[in-house]
Structures are given as structure tokens and as C-alpha cells.
Image (spheres, rainbow, N blue to C red):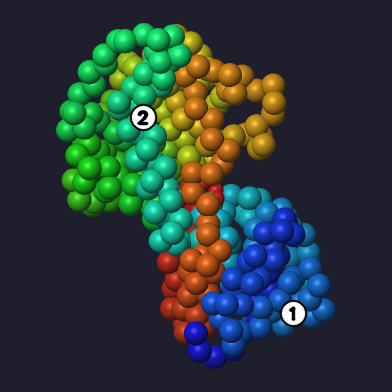
Amino acid sequence: MTGAATVAVLIEDPARSSAWLEALARAAPQWRICDGRTLASPEQADFLVLWGNVEGLARYRGLKAILSLGAGVDHVLRNSHLPPGIPLVRMVDPGLTQGMREYVMLHVLRHHLHVRQLEGQQKRRLWRPVSPPRATDRSVGVMGLGAIGGDCATQLAAFGFRVSGWSRRRKALKDVAAYAGPEELDGFLRASEILVCLLPLTDDTRDILDAALFSRLPAGAAVINAARGEHLVEADLLAALGSGHLSGATIDVFRREPLPEDHPFWTHPDILVTPHIASLTQVDSGARSILEAARRILEGESPPGLVDRASGY
Ligand code: NDP
Ligand code: OXD
């Protein structure tokens, strides 16, 4: 990385903060990387690296961009101190995408091959063969075809699944049937025996995984939500599983995190709970990716992941 710039880091969790400060310093040794909590002159910062619910953003008056350590920027956009008019860049990182690819492939395969049922049978010493179709006869739908969802859809198709994808604007991805906009949601859902949600959380997508949507999925469908907890109406999921219309769910993100101890998902036989780990941004790769975005901004280019604040992602 050439030239010099000042990067302030504001991360809610102090333990994570030191790891990021070190990784950013390794990735750009000639840049000034500072802890935003102790920075005396925030107005000198060119970039602000941000994660979590942090305060004091208004003091950063000379910013060229705000760089989010997360792919989802819903919580950043909700921050009432967020200065207007400054470019906001979300995390687009090959490591983050790869992590989600692995998570989605694992959980699609679990539902496809009835692993939960086999685990239940083993507990009861039951020898009952299952005979799922081949992947070529299994339809998987991916909601959200961005940096992460687009990759997962393409990889699932390359593996052999019959894949459909749904986005706001139509996408052309290899071997992925493209559906776009609310008017094509119905057709997309009917072609989704396993539904994977990788949408950003916006006013248009909040509560999208609800009873009406579940009723449009084929009977016996499974749902994987690795996007945001507020996409899912939790009571509607419980009802759809209870009625037998849905066969199972893998849920990584929740309306309240950590998931409260008395939450019914913990003990539900058809729900696998994972603690918001579908894909974690790894510091070295993530630091390189956001500093590359910063470098592009300094050079007057538009980096990948530039957020359209009006659309909310
Ligand atoms: P992107 O912003 O790159 O992609 C978003 C996709 O969703 C785009 O295809 C977009 O359509 C589509 N979309 C947005 N709004 C709508 C809508 N109203 N109707 C239909 N499609 C819509 O995001 P990423 O792929 O990078 O990440 C997706 C989400 O995954 C993040 O926002 C985050 O919440 C979640 N995530 C979760 C992690 C975890 O560990 N659980 C880790 C990382 C991310 P279009 O292409 O037309 O713009
Ligand atoms: C993200 C996340 O948005 O970790 O990157 O959920």
C-alpha cells in the first residue's frame, strides 16, 4: 500500500479491537492506524473502521469513508450518530465469502440428506434407511445474490443442485435460474425445497421469512437463515414446523443475540441453532480487504461494497 493515511478504529468489543488494530498495522505499515477511543484529534482521521454500536462518530469531521467490518451494515445505518454524506463501505472479502460457502453447503447437504433424521434414529438405535434424491433432483433457492449469496448459489449449482436465486435486480449467474423483485418471489419460492436467506436487512426485507412466505414453499421444505435475525418471524417458523409444512431449519442469526436461555429454538427437534458464526470476518484477510477499499477511495475509484444508503445495503 502506498501513500499515507490515518485510519481510526472504533470497535465495541475491546478484545476484538486490539486484534484489528494489529492486523490493520500489518496490512498497511506506512499508514497511521489508531485506536479511535484514545485518538486525540479525530478530525485528522481519513478513514474510520467501525463495528458494533459505538458512539462519538460526529467528532470525525474529515473522513473520506467509513469502513464496516461486517458485510451487513444494518446496525451501522441505525447508528443515530452516523455522519451523513460520507461514503460507507461494507466488508466484501474472499475469506468471508468462502466461510459462508462452507456453512451453506454443509447445511443444505444436512437437509438434503436427512442428517437430522439419521441422528435421531441413532439415538433410538433404529436401522431405517433413508433415500433422498440426488442433488440434481433437489431444488435450492437462494434469497439475495450479492457478494455472498451469489457465490453460494453458483457453488451449489456447480455441486449439482437445481438452484434458483432471487434478487432485487435480475442477475445472470451460471446455472442459476434468476428471479427478481416481489412479483417473481412466488415462482422462486415454489422452486425452493431448501431455502437459504442471504439478504441484507432493510425496510423491504425485515420479517420477510413469515407465515405467508413459508406457505408458498413446497411441503416439507427446509429453511436456512444466515442473514439477520430480523428477517425471521420466529413464531411463524415454529408454527410452520409444528404443522409439518416445513421439515427443518438451520438458524444462525436471531432477533436477540445471544439467544436467551429460555428460547424455544434451543430445544426444538427440527431446528439447528448456530451462534452467529456462519461466516466470521478473519482479521488478516478482512484488514487487507478494507484497506484495499480505502486505497481505491484515495485513488478516486469506487470500491466493491460501497453502500447505497437509500437502499439500506
Ligand atoms: P450484498 O449487499 O452484496 O447482496 C445483497 C443481495 O440481496 C443482492 O443480490 C440484492 O439484490 C439482494 N436484495 C436486497 N434487497 C432485496 C430485496 N428487497 N428483494 C430482493 N433482493 C434483495 O450482501 P452480501 O452478499 O455481502 O451479504 C448478505 C448478508 O449476509 C449481509 O447483509 C449480512 O446480513 C449477512 N451475513 C451474515 C453473516 C453471518 O455470519 N451470519 C456473515 C456475513 C454476512 P441486487 O443484487 O439486485 O442489489
Ligand atoms: C456480517 C456478520 O454482517 O458477521 O459480516 O454478520
Instruction: Quickly name the residue at label 2.
Output: 110
Q: Quadrant of residue 131?
A: top left
Q: Quadrant of residue 88?
A: bottom right
Q: Is residue 306 visible?
A: no
Say which residue appears at 19% left-offset and 39% top-offset.
Answer: 160
Element marked by disc 1:
helix
- Judge by depth and name the residue closer to the eye, 110 or 137: 110
Find residue 54 and report its horizontal and vertical position in percent: 74, 58
- Judge by depth and name the residue closer to the eye, 249 or 200: 249
Task: Give the vertical position of 176 relative to 54 (above or below).
Answer: above
Find residue 41 and report its horizontal and vertical position in percent: 79, 80
Find residue 308 and report its horizontal and vertical position in percent: 50, 59
Q: Which mark is residue 43?
A: 1
Three-letter code, disc 1: Glu
Say which residue appears at 33% left-offset and 50% top-offset.
Answer: 150
Say which residue appears at 49% left-offset and 27% top-offset.
Answer: 272
- Judge by depth and name the residue closer to the eye, 23 or 169: 23
Task: Give the vertical position of 291 relative to 286 (above or below).
Answer: below
Say which residue appears at 59% left-offset and 23% top-offset.
Answer: 266
